[in-house]
Amino acid sequence: MIPPSFDYHAPDTLEEASRLLLANPEAKLLAGGHSLIPMMRFRLAEPAALVDLRKIPGLSGIREDGGSLRIGAMTRESELEKSDLVQSRYPLLADTTRVIADPVVRNLATVGGNVAHADPGNDHPAAMLAYRASFVAAGPSGQRTIAASDFFTGPFSTSLEEGEILTEIRIPEAGPGSGGAYRKFERKVGDYAVAAVAVQLQLDGGRISGAGVALTNVGLTAIQAGAAEAALVGSDGGDAALDAAAEAAAAAADPTDDHRGSADYKRAVVRVLTHRAASSALTRAREAS
Amino acid sequence: MSSHQISVTINGEQHTREVEARLLLVHFIREELGLTGTHIGCDTTSCGACTVLLNGVPAKSCTVFAVAADGAEVTTVEGLGNGGLHPVQRGFTEKHGLQCGFCTPGMMLTSKALLDENPDPSEADIRWGISGNLCRCTGYVNIVKAVQRASELMKENSDG
């Protein structure tokens, strides 16, 4: 299948990329291309122009700085998989990366693309909501930081303005007593989730002092399950709290019937996965205490 | 609709061509250069039949625009053996790691990159490593054996 024709630009700076976006309202950014190019081949996306970010320096890399884990938007998923820092200190992120698409796709697919494409089936958005991550955007009026909870406004829609480009993802730095997990149920390697659940916990003196719970592919966007978070906070992480969180997460899910299952089935999957993710997050948070 | 002059080094040889922006790397390789060892399977970034090494890393060449590969080094199955048979190709031959052969070029390039990174993979490592390459004939059993054999051959080569 041949994609539609388009004009291709590969600018050297963010400023130029932003100018090209403003000058071409029907343009799309090209990062790893592993969501966009399949959509173009199916003619689900027909951008008049592509602005390729590959030549712009400084958009890749993983480091801790200023109280955050900072991930450049063009960082490949496989770089997260190979990062000792991510693997040792950010288990929710490590879990998530491992189940995105397949190993060959992850060599080119980018973290920023997974976030900014905002497909409700993408895995990073829920992980970022659970982490209370924030996103740095550069645009015509300078740089600003957007909380993950303000970012996902609809399917394939974000709060990025015209000409704005996601440049960096910031996750609060892992400290003692923090731990998380991502649990995804998929029909086969490389498929989108039937449902998936991200849980990030903070322990303080044996009790849960902070909790993030978010759901993948059971609504128009990734869903932050506030009632599930509330069920965990203040508890000791016993079965009663986990059961309550699982029920609350299932209630927060808003799935539809499709080829991956009925809405009732997906809600049941959310219930089970929330319990499993919370249990695993708890074990990891205790190990990090 | 823009066109661009690109230079891509494929199997050690540099090729310069004028290409339309929408030309996919797999079409550049097959139709512009006539290297038909790289196959087109699903056309949906699922099957991995079109896998090549892009700057040493396995990539699905149906999901890369040729213009974005400007300046890149690409290895296709034609360049794998460098004149003879690569240990991965010998492993697939000896262990009958193919039936129809359609997935084989991509499967072998992914396997080569896996073995370069992890010379002694477990069966689980191999099944994980090739999980982005689909085979509809073998049930993967002989492919796993072929990669294990290639691992042995590569170790023998480096010992000798």
Image: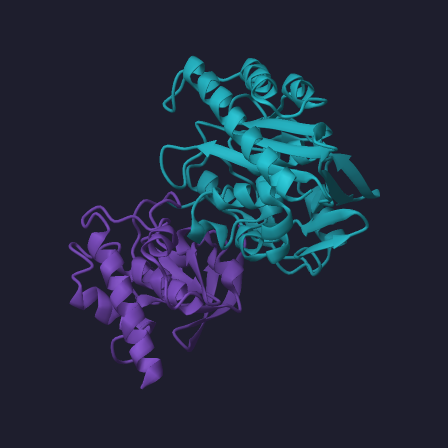
The residue depicted at 53 percent of the width and 16 percent of the height is: A250
Front residue of A40/A60: it is A60
Chain identifier, purple in the render? B
* Residue B157 position within the rendered picture, expressed as x and y whole percent measured from the top left: 31, 81
Q: In the displayed orientation, state which residue is furthest to the bottom.
A: B160
Front residue of A161/A105: it is A105
- Residue A210: name its quadrant: top right
Left or right: where A205 falls relative to B50 = right
Q: What tint does the image give chain A? A: cyan
Q: In the displayed orientation, state which residue is furthest to the right.
A: A141
- Figure check: A210 above or below A254: below
* Residue A129 position within the rendered picture, expressed as x and y whole percent measured from the top left: 66, 32
Q: Name the colouring of the figure.
A: by chain
- Figure check: A87 above or below A187: below
The residue depicted at 28 percent of the width and 63 percent of the height is: B147
The residue depicted at 51 percent of the width and 31 percent of the height is: A121
* Residue A111 position within the rendered picture, expressed as x and y whole percent measured from the top left: 60, 46
- Asked if residue B88 shows in the view, the reply is no
Instruction: Classify the position of the C terminus of chain A by image quarter.
Output: top right
Left or right: where B22 falls relative to A279 = left
- Figure check: A260 above or below A110: above
The residue depicted at 59 percent of the width and 44 percent of the height is: A91
